[in-house]
Image (cartoon, helix red, strand yellow):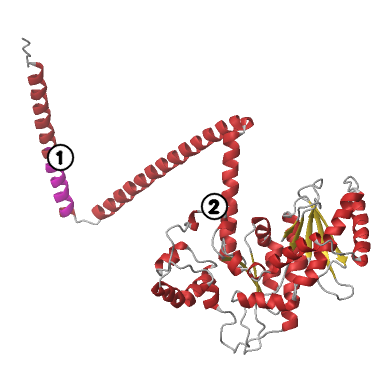
Amino acid sequence: MDVHGGELNVIVKYFGLGNAGGNIGIPVLIVAIKDMDPNVFFTKKVTGLTNTCEAGSGGYLYFCRSKCGNAALWRHWFSYICIPTIANAAMVHDLRDVNGNPHRSFLDTDGEATILNEAFDVDVMNQFQANRIDYLKLGPSATKTQQPWDAGNQFRSTKTGLSSTIRNNTNVEDELLRRNLLKYYVEFDTEYPTIKLTAKFREKITYSLMLIVHCLKKFILPDKMKASFISTGHHIENEVKEGEDSVNCELMMSLCLDSTITVHERQHMFECKEAAAVYGMVHGQITDEYMDSIQLYNTPNTVNRDELQAECRKYAFLVTHRDTNQRHYDYQQLKAHRQREQQLRTDPNNIIAVAAQKAQDKQRAKDTADHEKAAAGARRKAAKEATKQQETLRFEGLTMEQKAQERTAKKVAGLEIKRLREEMKVRQTAERNARLNMTVDVD
């Protein structure tokens, strides 16, 4: 959720974590500081930056060049906030199957490439595996129907509350938060002495954060969070018996259907959901090819996402699946290769390098062809030698009479071949003389 505009001139991004039990993670807020290096960030946990009234609670405040963060920031978020929050919730709820084994935790987010790419970091991926967390990237254009924060109007109601609070000039002063933000600014100045934040800009940041905290406490509430998960089908309100689905698949699917789908097509989709789910778990995603194979409904305007280059624009997929990791690695390798090719084609400084590369490729192709030619010749020679040796061994095993017969047969065959060659030579000579004696009459 982004907060900006009006007279504030401050851009703040709020990133929330919530679960079906109504638990809400500590606030994470990113403030854009234009003078910071795009590859670094600054963060501290700030007491009072919270959506609860619990004493001593706080949230993380990030200063970064962009409100969208950067690679290092999101690796920090995964490692120190996201995964520990999910692991702690799993420990508190302690849900287990009939065999007493703890259930796996489940995380889903939108497909923002800046965030998603860092989930593939080796250390982050190892943390997901160690804490038994499955991570799903939602399908494209599915946020409004499949993301509880948006579908349940958590963000919308908060933004509306922000606007009305500003419009009504509501007092949002928070002495504790203000005091701790001053400490935050001092630590930031110590670490980044060359970046000067004016007193006016700091006050705008302080007011913006107090405004956000005021609205978070009013609108991001446990009951609303739980209701949001129920409204999207991610959670069933009544207690679920062992072996039954803990999500309302029919509701989740129906939210994505439109009026052009026939009753028969709708029924077919519901009948295929279990097989499709198994396929997705095995392969990490469901492709257009699989959808076609089971004749699932597809609108005429649907994009074939197998052909899209940017993986974050493809289907919903399990980020933590081994096949997804391999696809991500292959995609990054292909992307790097294309970037190198583009650089060679467009950078004037690489003209010599391009020519040298072409010459090297040409020489490599010639060497390969020469090697294959030599290898083929060696194989033919070896085969001929082997045949000769076999023939020698066979001939040595014959009796004297058989050897004499074969010599006579070879001699007769040789004479016959010589006769045929002489006849051919005579015929060719006659044809050549006939052509020389031909005359052409020209009128």
Instruction: Decide which of 273, 424 is in the foreground and name it.
Output: 273
> Would you name the residue on which mark 1 appears?
414
The spot of residue 192 in percent (x, y) is 88, 49
- Could you tell me residue 178's position as x and y percent? 91, 62
Q: Residue at coordinates 81% horizontally, 51% vertically from top-left?
A: 7
Q: Can residue 78 be seen in this view?
A: no
Q: Is residue 365 left or right of residue 343?
A: left
Label ID, residue 309: 2
Please give the label number shown on residue 440: none
Relative image position of residue 367 (x, y in whole percent): 47, 38
The segment highlighted magenta reads 402-415
Q: Which of the 4 image quarters holds residue 342?
A: top right
Q: In which quarter of the image is the N terminus?
A: bottom right
Mark nearer the N terminus (1 vs 2): 2
Q: How far apart are marks 1 and 2 (CA)?
A: 69 Å
Residue 236 position (above or below residue 194): below
Label 1 or label 2, whichever lies nearer to me, is 2
